[in-house]
Image (spheres, rainbow, N blue to C red):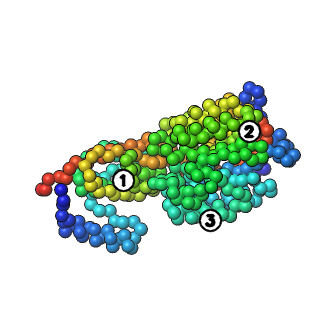
């Protein structure tokens, strides 16, 4: 395991989540995977293709490094999910570059938009990454014994970063049809809970989704948007935001405002990276990998 | 209320067309007012101009922003750091705008009927 890797492993019990943190050893999730049940996938986020400022003058380069590292994983993930802000300014050339780099991935790809991908119109995003099973951007599917929900909380951004009533209805109906014992994994760009509202790091109508998730034994909610790893537990719901592949942002409240954070060049790769996730019944292992070698 | 093009405006139009063909970034035209975007705020947040007036928006922030009318009558789309965008207001009214990337950023432009000839 690389020096900057760390692995957080949780097991859901009747009363909540039991956490353990370790740097080595076999975990339930990994054992279950070896036994043929469960699933492993990778999350990447906030590649901001088109960003060209001193905080990272080569975001395409660090994005490609990320993809190369994933391609080099000894066991390929079932899929790679990009949790949004693929581009910096939704420009056609930025989508082209992103598609080119993502095209080198060996594993299947799922992409959901961030607010930077739908500036002006969501048309360019859908042209580049739209999926037939998600005509409106959101979708759900079952894979490896896990029920996945991929949500979009940036389309109604003008009203405050919302999912909107239509999507909320979809989520509630979709979850109502699932067994409480089924592990649930939710993807969305902006954090679904009030991580830091003064900087807009929240989803105003996210509480309806969280209410619908409470009856499940094991829920994992994975977001991007804030360019740093923050983990949070609320009952049986476990939240984790991901690092960016482009540039970091300040920790909540440690600066006057959010935005690109300048770190010494020698430290940049240590704060960029990707995340691997292994889920089996009632156990999950999240490992964040930095690009630093 | 029609206004004839002045010689200056025609000259500026020619400059714009020429520059549009040759350069990615059009030159800034004279504007009656400039709104600076700094520290996630439009400065000034409220501005009054007249029909036919051109307003310049400048992004002085480290973060990208947009200038987007809530009624979608104008939209800068993505303005990167140091990016500029200009808009000529052609109809009187009160225009509320916001940043698509940070929707809590809000501004207002009040457009009065054309100023009387000097």
Quadrant the C terminus of chain A occupies: bottom right
Q: Is residue B3 above or below residue A167?
A: below
**In the picture shown, does residue A289 fall above or below A169?**
below
In this rendering, does residue A19 appear at all? no
Q: Earlier in the sequence, mark 3 or mark 2?
A: 3
Q: Which mark is residue B74?
A: 1
Q: Which numbered marker is on residue A120? A: none
Q: What's the residue at 69%, 61% (across, down)?
A: A105
Furthest residue toward right: A35
Residue A70 spot, x, y in % from top left? 72, 57
Q: Is B20 placed above or below A5 here? A: below
**Residue contact between numbered discs 1 and 3, judged by CB atoms under 8 Å:** no
Task: Give the spatial CA distance, label 1 vs label 3.
Answer: 32 Å
Q: Percent x, y for residue A280?
A: 79, 41
Dot 3 falls on which chain? A
Element marked by disc 1:
loop
Residue that badge 3 annotates: A100
Tell me which residue sits at (26%, 67%) in the image.
Answer: B12
The picture quadrant where one finds residue A128 is: bottom right
CA distance separating discs 1 and 2: 45 Å
Question: Could you classify mark 2 by the number of other residues whose Cα lies within 10 Å: few (under 14), some (14-19), or many (20 or more)?
Answer: many
Secondary structure found at label 2: loop
Callout 3 environment at 10 Å: few (<14), some (14 to 19), or many (20+)?
Answer: few
Q: Are marks 3 and 2 on the same chain?
A: yes
């Amino acid at each position: 395991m690389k020096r900057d890797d760390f692995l957080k492993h949780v097991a859901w019990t009747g009363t909540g989540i039991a956490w353990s943190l370790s740097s080595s050893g076999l975990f339930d999730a990994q054992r279950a995977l070896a036994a043929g049940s469960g699933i492993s996938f990778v999350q990447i986020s906030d590649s901001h293709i088109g960003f060209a400022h001193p905080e990272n003058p080569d975001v395409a380069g660090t994005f490609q490094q990320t993809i190369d590292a994933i391609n080099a994983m000894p066991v390929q993930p079932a899929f790679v999910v990009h949790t949004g802000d693929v581009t910096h300014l939704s420009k056609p050339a930025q989508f082209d570059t992103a598609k080119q780099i993502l095209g080198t991935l060996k594993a299947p790809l799922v992409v959901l938009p961030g607010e930077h991908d739908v500036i002006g119109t969501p048309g360019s995003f859908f042209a580049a990454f739209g999926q037939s099973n998600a005509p409106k951007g959101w979708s759900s599917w079952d894979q490896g014994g896990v029920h996945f929900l991929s949500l979009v909380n940036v389309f109604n951004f003008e009203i405050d970063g919302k999912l909107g009533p239509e999507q909320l209805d979809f989520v509630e109906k979709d979850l109502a049809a699932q067994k409480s014992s089924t592990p649930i994994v939710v993807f969305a760009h902006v954090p679904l809970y009030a991580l830091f509202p003064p900087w807009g790091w929240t989803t105003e109508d996210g509480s309806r989704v969280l209410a619908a998730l409470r009856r499940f034994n094991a829920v994992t909610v994975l977001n991007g948007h804030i360019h740093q790893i923050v983990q949070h537990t609320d009952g049986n719901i476990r939240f984790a935001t991901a690092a960016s592949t482009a540039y970091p942002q300040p920790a909540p409240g440690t600066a006057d405002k959010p935005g690109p954070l300048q770190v010494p060049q020698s430290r940049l790769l240590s704060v960029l990276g990707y995340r691997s996730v292994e889920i089996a019944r009632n156990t999950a292992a999240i490992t964040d990998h930095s690009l630093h070698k | 209320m029609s206004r004839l093009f002045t010689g200056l405006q025609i000259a500026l139009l020619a400059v714009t067309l020429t520059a549009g063909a040759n350069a990615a970034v059009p030159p800034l035209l004279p504007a009656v007012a400039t709104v600076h975007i700094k520290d996630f705020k439009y400065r000034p947040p409220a501005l009054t101009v007249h029909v036919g007036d051109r307003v310049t928006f400048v992004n002085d922030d480290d973060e990208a922003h947009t200038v987007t009318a809530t009624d979608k009558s104008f939209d800068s789309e993505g303005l990167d750091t140091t990016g500029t965008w200009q808009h000529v207001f052609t109809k009187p009214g009160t225009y509320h705008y916001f940043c698509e990337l940070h929707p809590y950023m809000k501004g207002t432009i009040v457009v009065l009927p054309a100023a009387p000839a000097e």
